[in-house]
Image (tube, rainbow, N blue to C red):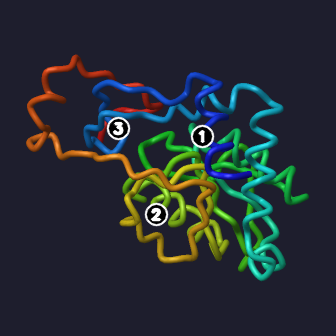
Amino acid sequence: MTQDEILEEFRAADALLEGHFILSSGLHSPRYLQCARVLMDPARASRLASALARSLPIEIKSQISMVVSPAMGGVIIGHEMGRSLGLEAVFVERPTGTFELRRGFRLKPGQKVLLVEDVVTTGLSSREAMKAVEAAGGQVVAAASLVDRSNGLADLGVPFFPLIRIDVPSYEPGAVPPELAAIPVEKPGSRKAA
């Protein structure tokens, strides 16, 4: 898929929003990609996951034997990536504020994992999920996401493969420009702001 085709998938799902948003990282932004909307159509989710899977280098695909994603946002794309790659897919969740494997999910000691997210902004959730994988005995060898909106700043410590990079400004709470501050704020994400 081309970058324009990927963006068209978001537009067609009314998932490319404009306004004043607080991201799960706590940063403010004039644009928000609501991946839950783009992934609610199973055919669209499959197309995007297939494109993302095709973009992974063969040396990464040949190593991994499990897909792990953080709940909530990464569950659907993680599952679809597992389908596209022919691998099992599990997720980590935060029942007490820290990611962990639950529901009987297990990793074999040293099992090579692909971490899959919907959107990476600061990389904090990805790094926290990676710690949970390591605590469970796995090894994250690469990360992938539908969208990298970190402006190239997210350092996950492993090779990172986003389907699309979108450079959208984001601001610390005390540095929101007046024109953005004048717009009513929305918090569309799946968890409280950091």
Looking at the image, residue 119 lies above or below residue 76: below
In front: 193, or 168? 168
Q: Which mark is residue 7?
A: 1
Judge left or right: residue 117 versus residue 29.
Answer: right
Q: Position of residue 135 (x, y in %)?
A: 56, 68
The residue that label 3 is drawn on is 23
For image coordinates 61% across by 26% down, the residue present is 37
Q: Position of residue 154 (x, y in %)?
A: 40, 65
For image coordinates 32% across by 22% down, the residue present is 186
- Per the model, the C-alpha gap separating discs 2 and 3 is 17 Å
Check disc 3 and give the amino acid type. Answer: Leu
- Per the model, the C-alpha gap separating discs 2 and 1 is 26 Å
The residue that label 2 is drawn on is 127
Q: Position of residue 76 (x, y in %)?
A: 70, 39
Looking at the image, residue 174 lies above or below residue 98: above
**Which mark is in front, 1 or 3?**
1
When asked about the image quadrant of residue 110, the answer is bottom right
In front: 113, or 135? 113
Q: Position of residue 103 (x, y in %)?
A: 71, 43
Quarter occupied by the C terminus: top left
